[in-house]
Amino acid sequence: MGKIEDLEVINGEGYQLTTLDKAIGLARANSVWPLPFATSCCGIEFMATMGSAYDLSRFGMERLSFSPRQADLLIVAGTISKKLGPVLKQVYEQMSEPKWVLSVGACASSGGIFDTYSVLQGIDRIIPVDVYVPGCPPRPEQIIDGVMNIHKLVKHESSRRRYSDEYKHLLSNYDIETKESEDVK
Ligand code: SF4
């Protein structure tokens, strides 16, 4: 037995064995395409995270997508007003599966200091969130930590999870329909 990153593999002379799930997870985790949904100050911190000093390209993530259909990680950074909520939800729904959500900062995660009539008190009221990054604003190091936690989820996710009843139930709580593909079932 051996390891590639933190995945168990069986080593032989001239070969390594692992499961298809683990190989897919490893490939996905090292080629995440983020879609930044940045509305305010936390968005500036995310820009700093993308810059050369912090360098998200070390994870193969330098290719930001501004088309939801070509992204698999939604990074929500900033205050989300209730009026903007349906737009965020539509962007999420337009992303294809499998997809993950990183909530950056207090505003996106809980409304932050804006406990007012107009601000959504956390994006998890309208879409499921995988990882939360605390802070107002979080430093780039914290955002990178959040990204690495997303990588862990991606790497260890079963390729069948998105077709499970549990996942359908999760999305149905948000009034979101799952798009099933018969050929991968
Ligand atoms: S959490 Fe703080 S820094 Fe981030 S968007 Fe809200 S007010 Fe700005």
Image: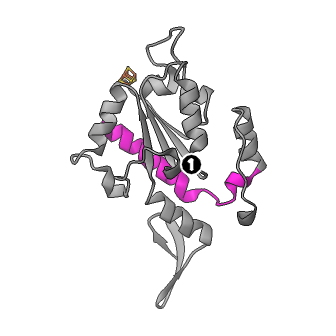
Residues in magenta?
138-164
Q: Which residue is mark 1?
A: 99
Q: Secondary structure at mark 1?
A: loop
Residue at 44% from the left image edge and 59% from the top image edge? 31
Which residue of the protein is positioned furthest toward the top in this rendering? 117
Q: Please, is residue 50 above or below residue 37 in the view? A: below
Within 10 angstroms of label 1, few (less than 14), some, or many (20 or more) residues? some
Which is the main secondary structure of the residues drawn in magenta? helix
Q: How far from the left and from the top, in percent, is residue 179?
A: 70, 49
Of residues 1 and 132, the one nearer the viewer is 132
Which residue of the protein is positioned furthest toward the right in this rendering? 165
Q: Is residue 128 magenta?
A: no
Residue 87 shown left or right of residue 176 in the figure:
left
Disc 1 residue: CB within 8 Å of ligand 1: no
Q: How far from the left and from the top, in percent, is residue 61?
A: 38, 53
Residue 74 shown left or right of residue 162 in the figure:
left
Q: Amino acid at mark 1?
A: Lys
Q: Is residue 129 visible?
A: no
Residue at 72% from the left image edge and 58% from the top image edge? 181
Residue 119 shown left or right of residue 181 in the figure:
left
Q: How far from the left and from the top, in percent, is residue 105?
A: 42, 28
Q: Please, is residue 165 above or below residue 25 in the view? A: above
Q: Is residue 43 visible?
A: yes
Q: How far from the left and from the top, in percent, is residue 78?
A: 41, 26
Of residues 101 and 143, the one nearer the viewer is 101
Q: Where does ligand 1 appear, by image quarter?
A: top left
